[in-house]
Amino acid sequence: MYREKGNHIITQAIEHKAVLDTCKNLEKHGFEVTYLPVGKDGRVDPEDVRKAIRPTTILIAIMYANNEIGAVNPIQEIGENCQGTRHYFASDGVQAAGKIPVDVQKDNIDLLAISSSQVLRTQGRGRAVCSPAQPSRAAFGHH
């Protein structure tokens, strides 16, 4: 199981409810979660992400764009903090894909979630895109 590598997760305080609920549940099972604040502009500060990283960090989950307030996070800068590390960088790209340029390699995203309802306007389909730059990391423990 991947938990052997660590038990710390970083996300933002205004992350999507599905991510926040999952983090709250994981805390009940011994995981530690850092909920980063956002600035007045609704964006997480990449420096706060960097400072929150611990040796036990296994996942950073930050949404690309927030549909409620329109904030677009500095994903490329956050991704740079993840380069060459042992943790994964996952981003909810549902509100960004098809509206602004999204590039998993340039942004150093290991896992990007998108929804066809936002991109193609078809219901009931989603996709998790794994970065081709990190094929062994994207296997999530199946190395």
Image: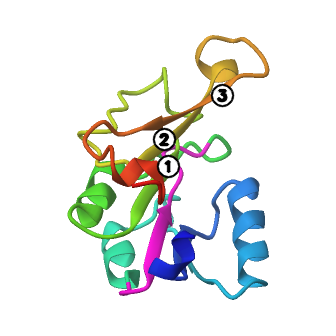
Which of the 4 image quarters holds residue 137? bottom left
Q: Can you tell which mark lies on residue 91?
A: 1
Identify which amino acid the numbered label 1 is placed on.
Ser
Quarter of the figure that contains the N terminus: bottom right
The residue singled out by tag 2 in the image is 112
Disc tally is 3
Q: Secondary structure at mark 2?
A: strand
Q: Residue at x 56, y 67 (%)?
A: 12
| First in sequence: mark 3 vs mark 2 | 2
| First in sequence: mark 2 vs mark 1 | 1
The residue singled out by tag 3 in the image is 126
Q: Is residue 49 left or right of residue 65?
A: left
Which of the 4 image quarters holds residue 135? top left
Image coordinates for residue 58, horizontal then vertical, percent: 46, 72
Tell me which segment is drawn in magenta.
54-66
Q: Secondary structure at mark 3?
A: strand
Identify which amino acid the numbered label 3 is placed on.
Gly
Q: Please name which of the two marks, 1 or 3, marks the residue nearer to the observer.
A: 3
Q: Quick check: 56 above or below 66? A: below
